[in-house]
Amino acid sequence: LKRFKRGPPSLSTQAPRHVRQGAAMDQTEKAFQKQDAVFIGSKRLLGKKSSRSVRYWRNVGLSFTTPKEAKEGHYVDKKCPFTGNVSIRGKILKGMVVSTKMKRTIIIRRNYLHYIKKFNRFEKR
């Protein structure tokens, strides 16, 4: 316990703390998190109060449904196919997730053995 000689410090000498209720995006990174497709300055309209923040999301196609977290969440990821600037193209691979330890990255194990009839064996391709 800390004892004060002249009494506790007064509250008026401490710096005021500002808490913003209902922040639009999760600000947990060092850089300011914002979506490129959303203009933040449009919030300053006079007399206009919106309960929800503006969020950019899209339907990527190929029979993928957009997750609810992408539509209603607060995360910002420029490499997300639903909310970022990445398009899904090429082959779609199937595999088993081995590790999710890295941030926004997963390690996938795939079975890609190819049978060779001549040698009666499998090879990795």
Image (cartoon, helix red, strand yellow):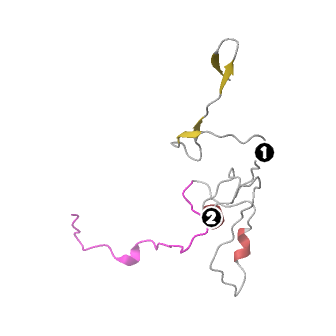
Q: Please provide percent x and percent y for residue 14.
A: 41, 72
Q: Residue furthest top?
A: 119
Q: Please provide percent x and percent y for residue 81.
A: 71, 53
**Mark 2 highlights which residue?**
68
Residue 22 shown in magenta: yes
Secondary structure at badge 1 equals: loop
Residue 2 shown in magenta: yes
Q: Quadrant of residue 29?
A: bottom right
Kind of residue at disc 1 = Arg
Kind of residue at disc 2 = Lys
Q: Please provide percent x and percent y for residue 1.
A: 21, 63
- Who's the residue at 53% across and 43% down the image? 100
Magenta region? 1-29
Q: How many marks?
A: 2
Query: Which quarter of the figure is the C terminus placed in?
Result: top right
Q: Quadrant of residue 90?
A: top right
**Mark 1 highlights which residue?**
89
